[in-house]
Amino acid sequence: MIKIQGLITTFFITLCTSATLWAQEPSLNLELYKQQLVHYYDSGDYNKDLLQIEKQAENYLNQRVKENIRNPNPKKLAIVCDIDETVLSNIPLLKANNLLFPLDTIHNNPPNVNDPAIPAMLDFYHNAVKQQVSVFFVTGRKDNLRDTTEKNLKIAGFTEWKALFCKPSNYHLNTVANFKTAARKDIEKQGYDIVLNIGDQQSDLIGGHSDKTFKLPNPYYYIP
């Protein structure tokens, strides 16, 4: 009898302890995490981190342009840029939706043609154009959004480019990396040396066919 009472007492203590643990705040609450992400943007830290990467990319590009000028047989230099969270910002849309919306919202539905330019990347773009480096945009947006995307780019200040590669409407692979790698291969076949490839997702950058890659910060969503 004493043994049974002891087991009951042990069970009761364990249950109370577990209840206490259940009542504690999780180590990382979703709402708190979203607040941190909004603060990262509103505080200016996101732009600071982005600007740091942009400056590295710009310095590298300037170096390559100088080397190319000295080259007896200069190459056709090019850069490849992603669009969303690389040259255009969807953060205002994300904030308006409490950082919650399907990822397909950007890539499958008509975007707001007033999506703002990311200032640091607009400067980077103008620097490339000024030095006669060809600009190619390679985006995961589907081809049915081409006209709207082109309009948004021009409104935001990206007024000229060699080509805009949009994902085919019948593309069904689980990653955009294959499409983006194929686009860079196509650019190389046109005789260009892709000096650098810049984007906010690893899927923008993997697969080769660029001399150097630069990854911009984006803790807001992930695209495989």
Image (spheres, rainbow, N blue to C red):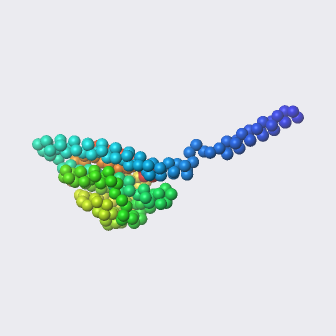
Residue with the most extreme top position: 3
Q: Nearer the viewer, residue 118 or 171?
A: 118
Q: Nearer the viewer, residue 190 or 13?
A: 13
Which quarter of the figure is the N terminus placed in? top right
At horizontal 22% and vertical 44% (from top left) the residue drawn is 62
Picture coordinates of residue 54 (x, y %)?
A: 31, 46
Above or below residue 65? Residue 126 is below
Picture coordinates of residue 192 (x, y %)?
A: 21, 50
Regarding residue 50, the answer to whether it shows in the image is: yes
Residue with the most extreme right position: 1
Residue with the most extreme front position: 43
Please state if 189 lies on the left or on the right of 174 as rendered: left
Above or below residue 56? Residue 180 is below
User: Picture quarter containing residue 4?
Assistant: top right
At horizontal 26% and vertical 42% (from top left) the residue drawn is 60
Please state if 102 lies on the left or on the right of 55 as rendered: right
Q: Nearer the viewer, residue 156 or 43?
A: 43
At horizontal 26% and vertical 50% (from top left) the residue drawn is 79
Picture coordinates of residue 34 (x, y %)?
A: 51, 51
Q: How many marks?
A: 0
At horizontal 30% and vertical 42% (from top left) the residue drawn is 56
Regarding residue 172, the answer to whether it shows in the image is: no
User: Picture quarter containing residue 89?
Assistant: bottom left
Above or below residue 114? Residue 210 is above
Picture coordinates of residue 118 (x, y %)?
A: 34, 54
Above or below residue 202? Residue 151 is below
